[in-house]
Each structure stands twice: as C-alpha cells, then as structure tokens.
Image (cartoon, grey):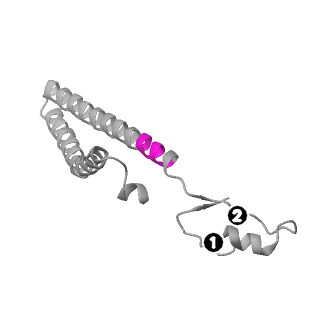
Amino acid sequence: LQWLRSPGPQHEKRTLFGDMVCFLFITPLATISGWLCLRGAVDHLHFSSRLEAVGLIALTVALFTIYLFWTLVSFRYHCRLYNEWRQTNRRVILLVPKSANIPSNQQSLLGLQSLKRNSKETIV
C-alpha cells in the first residue's frame, strides 16, 4: 500500500495511474469486441460466408493476443518498479535481547526499552 501511495518519481506515478485507467477501460472493451466478433463469425458461418467468418475469428485472436501482450508487459514493468522500490525502501528494527553483560541503564541509554514498533517495520 505504501508503494501505491508513493511509487517513486512523478513519471512513474503517471504511468501507473495511466495503465490502471487503461486496464479498466480496455478490459471490458476487449471482452465485448471479442464477443461481438465471435458472434458475427457464427452468424457468417450460418449464412455460408466462411471467408468473413475466418476473418472475424482471426481479428478476435489478434485482439486478445495484443491485449494479453500489453497486459503482460505492463504488469512486468510495474512489478520491476515495485521490486526496485522495495529494495530501496526497507525499514528494519533490530531487537537486541536483554543480556546479563549489558547493564539495564546502558540499554535504556541505547533506547532499546522505549522503542515503539510501527506496523510498517520489519522486526529482525
């Protein structure tokens, strides 16, 4: 969720937002277009127009191939950006167990006892 709020530089935010909007619009359009093409192909097969039916089926295959290719490329691009962001935006808390060797006043000086844990941080 942190990455979605702040994925990186401004152009990466615009790209993520643009791809999300395109995905929301293109998915139903591709589905409806594919359904209409296949429906038209079935109608043309009933009226013995095989060449037009084959053309509509080829159009449907091309449409879904391009849609899936765009979706895969876009998804891989944003996964790569997320992994880069995750590598550079880690929060780690080191918990040192109480030891007989370290007096309690030194532990409090180090701030180990008053350490507040944030839900966004990783405990090691």
Which kind of residue does numbered mark 2 sit on? Leu
Q: Quadrant of the N terminus?
A: bottom left
Q: Is residue 111 magenta?
A: no
In this rendered view, identify the residue nearer to me: 68 or 36: 68
Q: From the image, which quarter does the C terminus lie in?
A: bottom right
Numbered badge on residue 115: 1
Most common SS among magenta residues: helix
Q: Residues within 10 Å of mark 1 (few under 14, many from 20)?
A: few
**Distance between the Cα atoms at labels 1 and 2?**
9 Å
Mark earlier in primary sequence (1, 2):
2
Residue 53 drawn above or below residue 35 = above
Label 1–label 2 contact, CB within 8 A: yes
Q: Relative to the observer, which residue lies in front, 56 or 100?
A: 100
Q: Is residue 94 above or below residue 25?
A: below
Classify residue 123 as left or right of residue 60. Answer: right
Q: Is residue 36 shown above or below 97?
A: above
SS category of the residue bearing label 1: loop
The stretch of residues the image draws in magenta is 79-86
